[in-house]
Structures are given as C-alpha cells and as structure tokens.
Image (spheres, grey):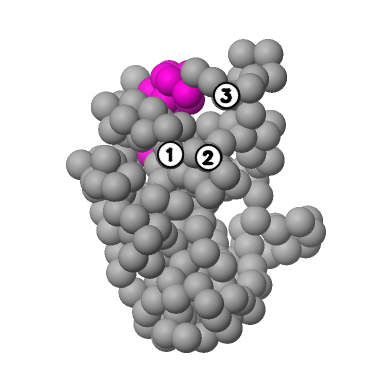
Amino acid sequence: MNKPVIYIDESGTLPDPKDRVIIVAAVGVQELYALDLSFKSVKKRRTIGEKPLELKFYKAGTKTKDLFFEKLSKQPISIFILVADKMGRKIPDTPENFATLCGLLLSEILHFYAGVQSIIFDRHFHKDQDEKQFNKILINFLGSRKLQLEHVNSIENYRVNVADMVAGAVFSKETGKEDKFYEMIKSKIVGEIKINWPEAKRRLLEQK
C-alpha cells in the first residue's frame, strides 16, 4: 500500500469580515485512483488530454456536484475539517495566520496517518517568499517532522481540487446555505475541529 498523500484547500477568506467562518479541508488518500474515479464520474467536463480541468465548488453546477460527491462518498478516503469562527474579525491573510489554521488541522491528521508521503496545498500565496515563510512556520508548529510540502496550481494538479470541493461543501453547510453535499460525504469525515480565532492564535503562541 502506498504512503498517504494529503490534499488541502480552504473556503472562505481571512480578511473579509462577511465570511463568518473559514474552512480548511484536508483529504487523505493512499491510492490515487480513488480520486481519479471521482473526477472521471463528471462525464460532461472538458478535459486536457485525459485530465479534467479544475473543478471548483462555487463554479460547478448542481448536477456536477451530485455526480462528484456521490462517487467520492464511496472511495477509500479520509476527510479532516477545521472550522474557524472569525468572530467578526478582519484577519490579515499572512503566512503566519494561514499556517496557524493548517497547523492545527495537520496536527490531528498526522496522529491519524503514519508515514505521510506528501502534503499538497492548492497554492494560496503568489509570492515565493510568503510560501517559504508559510512552510517554515508550519514545520515549526508541527515539530521536527520531515514533511514534504508542495504548493500546486489546481489546473496543473487536478487532484487538489478534491479539497476545494470538500471545503466548499462544508462552508455551504456552516453558513446555512445548503448541507446536502456535506451530508453526502459526512461518513468519510474522520476529524472535525471547531475553534474560534483567539483560541487558534493562542495555540500557535504555545508552540513558539
């Protein structure tokens, strides 16, 4: 059996006060075919060669989501969710703040999975220096673990879109818009952390 690969993306934003919560979602998988089957189930999507174009929760139609989540719910995956209540704050989108949320979620994931092969993020920061700072803070937060962190473009690495789809489904549920797609994948959720922003920051400071 292959070593686990973790895909991570978020829904909601730190700076926008209109977003009551921000969701960070991680999907763990040991056999990549499990994700490929879910993407291939979306028959009508355009493709680049044999690889689907990026699939985003808020751009996909209801039928596309139905097909995708129905197939995903039957695959051997593990989902981990962090729901951070911003408590009305406008929070700067800095490497430290985003690493705080990802670190809290990954702390739980790494207790569940042994020997994670790599952690793949849908690229969040556009500047290399921000990405490097994020990696440094995250590794420090998690301790001396030797982790392979990757930041990818979701068009070039379509599998990372699974995390966007899951994060969007959770955000939709948490904001009272629709819980249908969350319910479709609920059985695959291994861990779900709910935390407010002051507590998240306190946890980061404890690690310094």
Tag 3 residue? 45
Tag 1 residue? 62
Query: For the residues carrying marks 3 and 1, which lies nearer the camera in this image?
Result: 1
Span highlighted in magenta in the image: 28-42
The reply to whether discs 2 and 3 touch (Cβ–Cβ < 8 Å) is no
Using residue 90 as the reference point, say whether residue 206 is left or right of it. left
Using residue 173 as the reference point, say whether residue 61 is left or right of it. right
| 129 in relation to 113, above or below | below
Q: Is residue 35 magenta?
A: yes
Q: CA distance from mark 3 to mark 1?
A: 13 Å
| 188 in relation to 50, above or below | below
| 187 in relation to 13, above or below | above
Q: Earlier in the sequence, mark 3 or mark 1?
A: 3
| 74 in relation to 58, above or below | above
Q: Visible in this render: residue 97?
A: no
Residue under the point 64% across and 68% down: 95
Q: Secondary structure at mark 3?
A: loop
Instruction: Find residue 133 and report its horizontal and vertical position in percent.
Output: 68, 64
